[in-house]
Image (cartoon, helix red, strand yellow):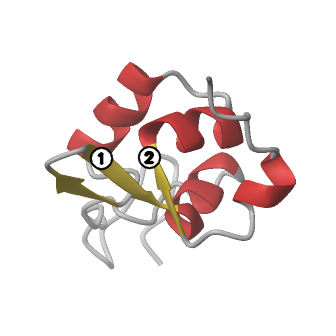
């Protein structure tokens, strides 16, 4: 007998989601979720059973706060003149 499919509301109460649950919760395919994990955009743990995703990290990714989990971006050197500036 197949397991019942959990609702998004039920999954929103869990701090960690397996790949199937993360797919149901986010609508992102399992292969895309794995790619976002490998790129450091979504936090997850690798286990013998597969990936376990951090729901808060997944929420941050889904709401557009995609900086979480990424490497820091290099800032332009301060005090350098940009095109069109007078340098004052």
Tell me if mark 1 has few (under 14), some (14-19) or many (20+) residues whose alpha carbon lies within 10 angstroms of its own. Answer: many
Measure the alpha-carbon separation of dots 2 and 1.
Answer: 46 Å
| x and y, in percent, of residue 64 in the image | 66, 51
Seen at 23% across and 44% down, the residue is 49
Mark yes or no: residue 23 visible: yes
Find residue 83 and name its label.
2
* Looking at the image, residue 80 lies above or below residue 10: below
Of helix, strand and loop, which one carries label 2?
loop
Q: Which residue sits at x=36%, y=55%?
A: 52
Q: Viewer-proximal residue, 86 or 51?
A: 51
| Of residues 9 and 82, the one drawn nearer to the viewer in this rendering | 9
Q: Is residue 62 above or below residue 74?
A: above
Question: Badge 2, how many Cα within 10 Å: few under 14, some, many 20+?
Answer: few
**Residue 28 numbered tag:** none
Q: Residue furthest left?
A: 48
What secondary structure is found at the residue carrying circle 1?
strand
| Outermost front residue | 1
Horizontal arrangement in the rendering, residue 77 relative to residue 15 (left or right): left
Residue that carries the numbered disc 1 in the rendered image = 51
Sequence-first disc among 2 and 1? 1
Rendered residue at 33%/78% (across/down): 79
Let me know if residue 39 appears in the view. no
Tell me the quarter of the image containing the N terminus: top right
Residue 83 x, y percent position in the rendering? 44, 46
Where does residue 41 sit, x and y in percent of width and height?
38, 50
Q: Choose mark 2 or mark 1, whichever is in front.
A: 1
Q: Position of residue 63 (x, y in %)?
A: 72, 53
Residue depicted at 62% across the width and 24% down the height: 2
Q: In this view, does 68 lie above or below 82?
A: below
């Amino acid at each position: 007998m197949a397991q019942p499919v959990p609702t998004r509301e039920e999954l929103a109460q869990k701090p960690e989601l397996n790949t199937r649950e993360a797919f149901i919760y986010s609508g992102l395919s399992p292969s895309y979720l794995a790619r976002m994990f490998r790129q450091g955009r979504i936090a997850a743990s690798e286990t013998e059973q597969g990936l376990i995703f951090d729901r808060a990290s997944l929420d941050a990714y889904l709401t557009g706060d995609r900086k979480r989990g990424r490497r820091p971006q290099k800032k332009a050197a301060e005090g350098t003149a940009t095109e069109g500036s007078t340098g004052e």
